[in-house]
Amino acid sequence: MCGIWCAVTTHDHIHPNKEIQQLLERRGPDSSCSTEFTLSRETHSGESQTVYTTVHSTVLALRGDTAVKQPFGTATGATLCWNGEAWEIAGERPVFDNDTVAVAKLLDGVVTRTHSSHSNGTLISAKQAELVAEAMAQISGPYAFVFYDPSNGMLYFGRDFLGRRSLLWRTAGDGELLLSSVAGPMSPGDEHPWTEVEADGLYYVDLASPYGCDDVYGSVQKVPYRLAELATHIGTRVVPRLSLNKDLPSSQTRLHSASSAVNQLEVLLRSSLRRRLENVPGSKDAIADSNLAVLFSGGLDCTVLARLAHECYPEHKKIDLLNVAFENPRIHKADSDAYELCPDRITGRASHAELMRVCPERDWVFIAINIPYIETLAHRQRIVDLMYPHDTEMDLSIATALCFAARGTGVVSSTVDNHAPPFTTTTNAKVLLSGLGADELFGGYQRHTTAFNRKGCPGLLDELDLDVSRLGKRNLGRDDRVISNWAREARFPFLDEDVVAWAMAASVDKKCGFGEPQASAEDADGSDLLEPEKKVLRCLAWKLDMKLVAKEKKRAVGAPFDMRETSR
């Protein structure tokens, strides 16, 4: 995890201002460094012009034995700013050591090949961009990056196909190009606001070209993602095509805990979690400390992840369950235990109890994060700045819940000694598991139910297809900015490339239970009678002996009141 800053101008080097610098350092407290480049070029009018490139990175060390400082200089003289996790490269070798070094080596190979294939020193920028795009298509995992090859003035940047890491861009009006992981406080009426870099391909600009003139921002070009050929499995590309299988099932059977689809999903999720839990960083001196936490509402998605993580993570290690509850003065009475009455607290306690019953050998630490209304008010503007350029009340509600969850400070009550007083603690975990993505992939939203009730399977498929098509345009950048502000990294097992590819290829009856035939007398274990939303995941929970969780109804994430109230 890191913070990225890059500025390209034709008048001077630009470093992040104080506010952005502080936000970048909160994301990456282990290292903060800058590198400057200058490049002379001839404009289309024959005049000499200097291009100034400034790259800055902060690092949160999560991979390898030591922190690798960034910007990272490669063997060819190129520079990489890498904010991501390369779980695998080319679909074959797992990357256990520092992935910044592995990605730099991958991209350096492109630079070397293009240099050797153009011995006269004339490089075709579009050709190198194609090769860089092909290289990035081999990486499994979330990322945002900036890569500069000063030997030919090529600057590359982009995000993974789902936009799981934040990268923003803007121009300040002079044609300059600014890139940053965070925006910082914005002035009202700013004529040149930050926007998300779209998660739709590799972006690049040829800084040596005389045709860009002063307008660097306007010279940016794009190479679309290089997608995996799922039907043939040819090549080393791993980016799945976000194209839903919309074939209607010719015949439908009821999903149950022994269905092949349930077994397939279980295998994929275990594999996804193993990649994300390999060598989770933490204190080497505190053997039983918790280095892993789950953003834990007690709902189906996060509880299934916690249950499967138990089997992929060292048994002697604690796992923290971060559960947020908000005081709402319009609902809760002054003398009531407001936090324990919140729906997420009720389901969180129940799911925690079920985890302790099913996996008693694990020390599950339930951290009850209680947020008074006055504290929500105090943090409002800070959260607004972090989530920017997202700016709706729904954004603010969700970002508020994520912000306090990621802070990880709450109350722990002993599950062994009922007489031991509760105590306040803050999680040590740098890695947070999130269940985000399951609703979109497996039909968990109320609108999916509504679509089926109104238009049957075709309507449901249209709604699912819409969700899938905009996965990369949704809110993952916002979530990354909010969560990473606490020097923690969210990991999304449901958004693993293999899990997404399976969900795209599977027919709708392998994921949801809408329109299933009447249950027969032979259906004995009860899993076939579960709710239709995300039924494949409910059946998996049932198979894992988490039966109460399997029956749990879906609820929205967010603060339990209209956030507009906090501005009054």
Image (cartoon, grey):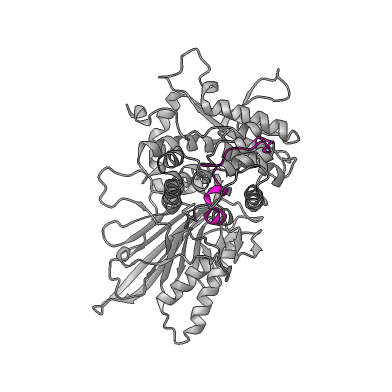
* 507 in magenta: yes
| Dominant secondary structure of the residues highlighted in magenta in the image | loop
Q: Quadrant of the C terminus?
A: top left
Q: Nearer the viewer, residue 568 or 424?
A: 568
Image position of 102 (left or right of 419): left
In the image shown, does 256 or 89 lie closer to the viewer?
Answer: 256
Whether residue 295 appears in this view of the structure is: no
Residue 404 pos. (x, y %): 50, 34
From what the image shows, is residue 98 above or below residue 208? above
**Residue nearest the viewer, comparing 231 with 118:** 231
- x and y percentages locating residue 454 in the rendered image: 40, 40
Q: Residue at x 66, y 45 (%)?
A: 282
Taking the image as drawn, is residue 228 in sight? yes
* Image height of 414 relative to 319, above or below: above
Q: Is residue 402 magenta?
A: no
- Specify whether 169 is left or right of 496: left
| Percent x, y of residue 107 | 53, 69
The magenta segment = 501-526
